[in-house]
Image (cartoon, helix red, strand yellow):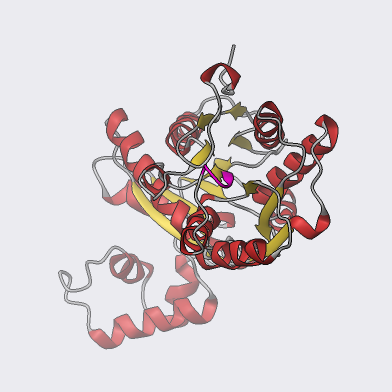
Amino acid sequence: MITIKDVARKAGVSGTTVSIILNGKADERRISESTRERVLSAMAELGYQPNLSARRLRVQTKTVPTLAFYWPIDYRSNILASFLNSFQTAFKNRGIECDLLIRTYENDQIEKSIDPLIKNSYTGALIGATSQKDMETLEKLNLQVPVVLINRRSEKYSTVYTDYKAIGFQAASLFRQKGYTDAAVFTSKRPYMATGLRTQAFLNACAQIGITVDPEEIFATTNSISGGVQAARAYCSASQPSKVIFCESDQMALGAIWELNRQGIRLPEDRELLCIGMMDPEMTEYSSPSLSTIQMDNREVMERAVDLLMDAISGGPKEPRQIEIPFQVCLRSTFQVHASAVKNNFPS
């Protein structure tokens, strides 16, 4: 591992000078710009990564954890905003201060962003929305810092998740309770791990309880608002489409209802639509018409994830812990059943 001494030797300065520059006190100690440039150049050449957690503990009288939040850069960035709001609330409620670094990564390529994690540059980390390949990468590591995964299952790391099979079965059951025997599905061409599992769970449940989903009625597009528009457009072009639609994300559903409105199809009078809610509930509650969702509780997920992470940082249990967060059925305008038919997934 590259150390401050290695950087100092490369730059031709003392280790103390390197530390002063790293701690942002170069101006105060009147270190020249040329010396700073030599040190920074040496750090870049050697690939030196400072241990931020240790350095902050040394220079601050108050211990402030440095946490990393890993999240992919794709359509799921909309969900990130909901998690960040929940994160801020969770720490405020606990009276804890922290430095939060958002670490973005590309789907299937988390290995390009985890070097600081491997080098113990953070006090702890939350990692969300990993693909199967990313999970395999993480499972091979022997990290020294606490890590909590969001909406994934793992025997190696603590996790906070919602049961995707229960979500899929709940959606299919609601369709069956209203007497539907066939359904259309709006899904992603390249499903991400969690959304793909929830959609597959819905299809499996349909097969079990007597709902037919014809392959021609699975409309695959991008998992985005514009993708929902495209799926709805293809659906409306079909000769005899099913009267009920399962949409694998609320983002797609927002685009879908826009196109259905444009084509004069009324919800729920002419068609019904139910989707998985992953964004802030306000995004779907105040759409027109308001979307019926099986809602993921991002606030509760983050609350429990913060609990697990801070407990581990404070020296709590070393073994991984798994916490399941219940979902909630939010029936609004696009799909309605009698209240007695709804079975929210709350712990008994």
Query: Does residue 285 appear left or right of residue 263 in this picture?
Result: left
User: Which x, y percent locates residue 154?
Assistant: 70, 39
The quadrant the N terminus occupies is: bottom right
The quadrant the C terminus occupies is: top right
Pick the front one: 3 or 324: 324
Q: In this view, does 102 lie above or below 47?
A: above
Q: Can residue 81 be seen in this view?
A: yes
Q: What's drawn in magenta, residue-wise?
A: 268-273
User: Which x, y percent locates residue 196?
Assistant: 71, 51
Q: Is residue 222 above or below residue 133?
A: below
Query: Does residue 41 appear left or right of residue 295 in this picture?
Result: left
Q: How many marks?
A: 0
Q: Residue at x 47, y 79 (%)?
A: 44
- Prevalent SS, magenta region: loop
Q: Which residue is drawn at 39% across and 42% down?
A: 285
Query: Does residue 185 appear left or right of residue 6 in this picture?
Result: right
Pick the front one: 77 or 68: 77
Pick the front one: 205 or 264: 264
